[in-house]
Amino acid sequence: MTSTVPALSTRTADGSALQAVLLDMDGTLVDSEGFWWDVEVEVFASLGHTLDDTWRHVVVGGPMTRSAGFLIEATGADIDLDELTVLLNQGFEDRIDSSLPLMPGAARLLAELSVHGIPTALVSASHRRVIDRVLTTLGPQHFALTVAGDEVSRTKPHPDPYLLAAAGLGADPARCAVVEDTATGVAAAEAAGCQVVAVPSIAPIAPAARRTVVPSLEHVDLAFLRGLMTAA
């Protein structure tokens, strides 16, 4: 975990019940879920295997150890997990060097949270080396801290990354709003006790208690996030 500022107070300046906003990265802030799948397809093609498109729903949103392990088992490819992880990370980095579009509404939401001094964390299952590259596009100044998947013993769908982020911001998880795009990330946030906004990218996500589903980040702003806490 890296932190760009010291731990912040548990209350926002106006006393709002919203103490912090915790944001997923791939598919939530940056339009990169398709990049990961394209890289996986290319790497396995080089190994002589064709990926079934239905597997995309299995590997989306999870830690690389899970997704890469699944693909090795499903294809029977002659490669170990460590070697495959290096190839996938490198392939992804090569792609984002040339293009990394933000999701609609992402830039506006990050700017609004920054202007109002809302403690914000980036919480991703991606590895640190990938997060640091993506931060150059997102703007590291928007995040008080960042949590990478290879920096926790248990990443999503376990609650550990979100609990770590909330603690780093000095916030009560129940007063944190999490924005996620996959069922895996939603499960992690809900297990941590956070209020969740789901913005589905690849697979649909159903509404549930403490979970609000919206079609895009263009429907999410600070007033919306504070409203979730008031309703809760």
Image: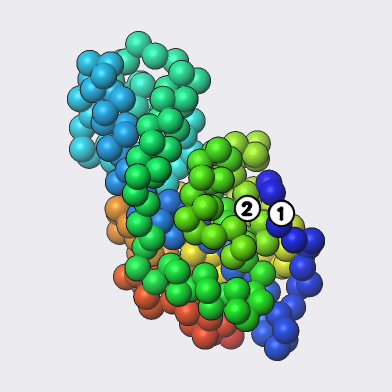
Q: Is residue 56 above or below residue 222?
A: above
Instruction: Categorize mark 2 by other alpha carbons within 10 Å: few (<14), some (14-19), many (20+).
Output: many
The answer to whether mark 1 and mark 2 are in CB contact below 8 A is yes
Residue 44 position in % (x across, y down): 28, 23
Measuring 45% from the left and 69% from the top, which residue is drawn there? 107
The image quadrant that residue 229 belongs to is bottom right
Label count reads: 2
Disc with the residue nearer the chain's start (1 vs 2):
1
Measuring 67% from the left and 69% from the top, which residue is drawn there? 119
Residue 103 position in % (x across, y down): 36, 63
Q: Residue furthest top?
A: 78
Measuring 70% from the left and 88% from the top, which residue is drawn there? 14
Q: Which residue type does callout 1 highlight?
A: Ser
Q: Which residue type does callout 2 highlight?
A: Thr
Query: Which residue is identified by label 2?
Result: 146
Q: Secondary structure at mark 2?
A: strand
Residue 98 position in % (x across, y down): 35, 45
101 or 231: nearer the eye? 101
Q: Residue furthest front?
A: 98
Q: Which mark is residue 3?
A: 1
Residue 193 position in % (x across, y down): 62, 62
Q: Residue furthest bottom?
A: 14
Quadrant location of the C terminus in the rendered image? bottom right
Instruction: Categorize mark 1 by other alpha carbons within 10 Å: few (<14), some (14-19), many (20+).
Output: some
